[in-house]
Amino acid sequence: MAATSRSVIAIGGPVVPSSSDPTLPSLTPDSTAAFINREVSWLSFARRVLALAEDPAQPLLERVKFAGIMGMIYDEFAMKRLGGLFRRVRRDPPRRGPDGLTPAEELAACRAELRAQQETVAGVVEKQLRPALRDLGAPIVDVGDLEPAQRDDLARYFVDCVEPILTPLAADAAHPFPFISNLGLNLGVLVTEPGRRKHRFVRIKVPANRPRWVPLRDDAGWVPIEQVIADNLGVLFPRASRLECHFFRITRGAKDDPWTDQIVDEDADLTPGAIIGMVTAELTARKYAGVVRLEVSAGMPAELRDWLAAQLNTDPADVLAIPGMLALGDLMRLPVPGHADQRDPPHEPVTHPRLRHPDHHDPSAIFDEIRRGDLLVHLPYHSFETSILRFLRSAAADPSVLAIKLTIYRTSRRSPIIEVLKEAARSGKQVAVLVEITARFDEAPNIGWGRELEQAGAHVAYGVERVKTHVKLALVVREEADGLRRYVHVGTGNYHEGTARLYEDLGLLTADPDLAAHAAAVFNELTAGIPAPTPGKLLVAPHDLRERFTELIRREARHARAGRPSGIRAKMNQLQDPQMIRELYGAGLAGVPIVLNVRGLCCLRAGVPGLSPTIRVFSVVGRFLEHSRIYRFENGGTPEFYIGSADLMTRNLSRRMEVVAPVGDPVVKAELEEVLRTYEQDNCSAWDMRPDGEYVRRHPDGTEACRSAQQVFIERCAATAGSPV
């Protein structure tokens, strides 16, 4: 086993003493201390990502990227999770969760941790990354540190390119306080005019259609645009005798999901037009949702900060004074050219060995290959374009293909998949697409995709009543010499060529007739409301996925009690469902060895004597976002594998349409076995959970080299680049 670092990530929540503590309380699967709070655990994951921004061993520009990712993570947490906690506090304040916390206690813990983390990342940016960028010759320069000639250049840029599109909005007796949009960056300007003792407040929104990072001449670095505006306020207020400027931004809570938060009337009109109208109304409401976080520059006077909070109806506990720049997510777009030595080595996905045919332009070739045996695609190591996208393009081009069916949860702005489906529909093929228009923050583009597909002649369904469709499924029907044959892709990630280069995911291409027949039945439920048969080859939520996973876990417990080989090894994004956690605790107490690779939040406590002595939890955090789901059950020595779209979350098991597929092909089983083993052997990007919920990063001991799972996968795929199977 790899040695571990002494740096430990620990954040608030119910405390479980170390396993070496003789006073360790006796916990049962029903004890509140047996569960880690969901929101606190999610922020623990954020801490693990933050560690990459802090890590001096990381290339500098990767650290800058991770600091930007942290800004985006905190924005999303505030919108989704803080917004949800505010609603729970209002709706049911005394109700306690499985971890024993009330919504108000959760909110207090999250506020404190979010504040601490944002202060930490701000300190990393100001004290470590900006000085390092300066030494690299690519500085982010404060306007006050510029030479006079440089300030003159920026003044001309302001007058020519920025000032014409600004709209100062006053807040005084004649002007109500202006509407402040979500996540926009703003200047709060106090304007004092000659002969007046009292100042006026004027808000100026930083235009989002101008670059955040304004370049200096001769590649001397960049100046944040808000500082350029602040340095030229005299152009906007030529009569002012005094100008004082501070920066701020707000976060509005995401409104309720009409499906998963169960706010839809049982008798509501759920026709496609009504669903689109409902989602469109929700988008409008989100724009005006309540403020859950107010970020201000650290130098803003307390009096102005309190006045802003009052105008925005914001609790003082949700006001964060940030030392340094606001809106750190924009660091993701800092345009530093060159410096390859300060970045991760470039990664170019390779074509799967079985798809490197000399006749790859023949649309029938990929179907011939799938008939030879199931095929496992591992993104982003295998190319999305030459595997999944090729599968769909071939289906559109192949005259033997009669029908294509697909689910769309998220896809890219200029999605080639949408174009492929439109082309197939126009050519006379039957095209059916389930477009999930309640996919949070992708509602508007998904409505647009649905309308485009309908205009091209495709059959479009806009979701299933009262559940969100999270299925990742594609079905192709082809006419062959021996009759009609179905081909299926079951994935763990979205049909999105952009995230396919950034997210780790798995996809199974198969022509298994039983699995394909059940996939066809699932599509009939998605498009027509005809319930898919259960049980079937696929495990389908919300129908029988929970029950079948429960039985698989209990079967392992029976094997363990009987002395037969037993074990559960799984990889997932999140683990939260209390019932499934209790089942895992029960299996562990029966002697089942359980290894869980959980990238994000995990509410289960691992390694607690008397509760989870045989359960180990670890998390892998690296350059790619771990996103695949794999479930392996030892089954008395005849292991079974499953992959699919579902985590062990209540929402996945009970409030979403999900599909998990069994893997029958022995070659694919062996590949999945190796994937799980590679993660377990990671000794530098994996973090182990301790019984008290702390995470400790693994480091190689003195006798072994660094073994990052993601790098191992890159090297393995690169080694096969020239060797078709």
Image: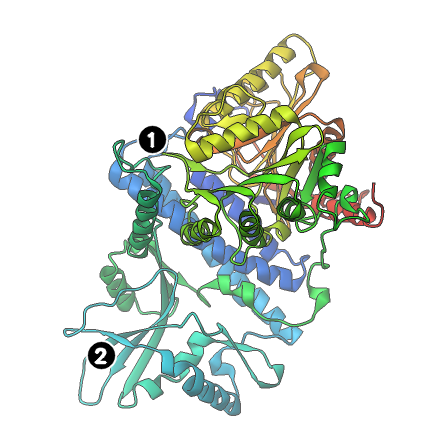
Neighbor class of circle 2 (other Cα within 10 Å; few <14, some 14-19, many 20+) is some
Q: Which mark is residue 638?
A: none
Q: Residue visible at 52% across and 67% down?
A: 126
Q: Position of residue 309 (x, y in %)?
A: 27, 60
Q: Residue visible at 63% across and 40% down?
A: 401
Image quarter of the C terminus? top right
Q: Position of residue 519 (x, y in %)?
A: 56, 30
Outermost left residue: 173
Relative depth, front residue between 582 and 484: 484
- What's the amino acid at mark 2? His
* Residue 229 as seen in the image, left or right of residue 17: left
**Relative to 445, is 370 above or below?**
above
Relative depth, front residue between 355 and 98: 355
**Relative to 663, is 12 above or below?**
below
- What's the amino acid at mark 1? Arg
Instruction: Answer whether residue 121 is visible to the viewer in this image.
Output: yes
Q: Secondary structure at mark 1?
A: loop
Residue beneath disc 1: 96
Q: Secondary structure at mark 2?
A: loop
**Relative to 31, is 13 above or below?**
below
Precedes in sequence: disc 2 or disc 1? 1
Image quarter of the N terminus? top right
What colour-coding does the image apply?
rainbow
**Relative to 420, is 4 above or below?**
above
Residue beneath disc 2: 199
Q: Residue visible at 55% across and 66% down?
A: 333
Q: CA distance from mark 2 to mark 1?
A: 47 Å
Outermost right residue: 723
